Image (cartoon, rainbow, N blue to C red):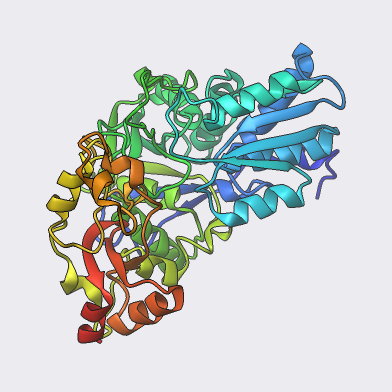
Amino acid sequence: MPVHDSLIDLVGDTPLVRLRRLTEGLSATVLVKVEYLNPGGSVKDRAATAMVLAAERDGALLPGGTIVEASSGNTGIGLAQAAAVRGHRILVVLPNTVAVEKLDILRAYGAEVVTTPGTLPREHPEHVNNLARRIAAETPGGWFANQYDNPANPEVHYASTGPEIWAATDGRVTHLVAGIGTGGTISGTGRFLKEKGGVEVVGADPLTSRYGGGDGSPYFVEAAGQYLHTETVDDAWPLSYHQDVVDRIETVDDRTSLLTTRALAQQEGLLVGASSGLVVAAALRVARGLGPEHTVVAILADSGRIYLSKYHSTDWLRRMGFLDDDRPGLLVDAVGAVRTVTPSTPLAEALAVGGGQPIVPVVQPGRDPGAATAVSEILGALDPAVVADPATQAGELAGPPPFAVGTGETAAEALARLDAAGAGCAVLLRDGRLAGLLTRAALVARR
């Protein structure tokens, strides 16, 4: 085998693998490009390496400089890998919602990690991109990689990922399916394939993501989609995303994405992240109705090894209400209507709306009240004068998200966790979204 000068020389040239069990009954061929076989474990190795090398050539990143990036994890890992090889310092800013495994991997590479709330409006100074940009500007020798707007991101896929797919399929590829995060992968790969052979390019997007026309409310697939905070003024999309390349977008709900992720591991031996489950779910939909002359290629962005505590954890899936089974006593039949209020609702009105509920969920206006990350409770024994004051709003006294149990748990399991936490009641989650309220007494009755 050849000897390489450094690890980053191994980035790219990932294989295509034919899906067999998940495509049963389909005439079209469905191939997946296994990007987790890049040395850093994801497709982002390509963009990270390309951005670092381009910045070095341009003089934007000097020897021994500091790379700073805002990332959901994978680009940060790719940059940390490149930084180790090229002798740079690396600091990565991440939302506090990412899987813990990503933080551990970054630190293992020697990266400095800064976390910030993942649900801030774009204009907030602590928003992940703003914080990273500020740190880079204040750091001597700092360089902000800026994957969302860096032209090296889509260009590396035009130069490598697209040609690899074309060559591996002998030009027989007819459809490309990829997720849209920064947009670099689908834009660069798609542009090359469209120029070569008129390939149809399909974006796979979470159901509520802005790219596919959703309201931008939270979703559970990391490293995909466009989230939009209700207070964000400018819904700017990345310059790395070239919308004219994408012919259409298939939106996929979280449950389908996560269960497809598990099926890829258990039926095809492919341990991948949820963005890959999203893409394969969309690719299977695209393949339905196509004849044997068609070849669909789906890009699997990253490895499932960095999501073992989430998407590949049976306990997590049950507690979030994504996974059902045939065990007796599941809380699926406890799903019921829940009255909610907005942060600006006068407190007295909010308590009246609650109608005796042990928890009054406070959610952002115009958002699905099921968005788990937007749920909080009105706390405590309140001063009657405070309650009566019409100027007092529910959002002022809303606490953190209350204790939650999932429809995939049995009543006995949920009760044990409730008691261990010292909570008297809980919100019920179905597919990660608010689906009911349960008191301890109600759980005891169901046990």
Point 34% across, 53% down: residue: 257
Looking at this rendering, what residue extends furthest in the top direction?
58
Q: Is residue 89 visible?
A: yes
Q: Is residue 333 left or right of residue 434?
A: left
| The C terminus sits in image quarter | bottom left
Point 27% across, 69% down: residue: 407
Quadrant in which residue 2 is drawn: top right
Depicted 320 relative to depicted 229: above or below: below
For this rendering, which residue is in front, 181 or 435?
A: 435
Quadrant in which residue 215 is drawn: top left
Picture coordinates of residue 152, whole percent (x, y): 61, 21
- Count the marks: 0
Q: Is residue 12 visible?
A: no
Picture coordinates of residue 78, whole percent (x, y): 67, 39
For this rendering, which residue is in front, 166 or 258?
A: 258
Q: Is residue 181 left or right of residue 73?
A: left
For this rendering, which residue is in front, 359 or 44?
A: 359
Picture coordinates of residue 242, whole percent (x, y): 42, 19
Depicted 58 relative to depicted 253: above or below: above
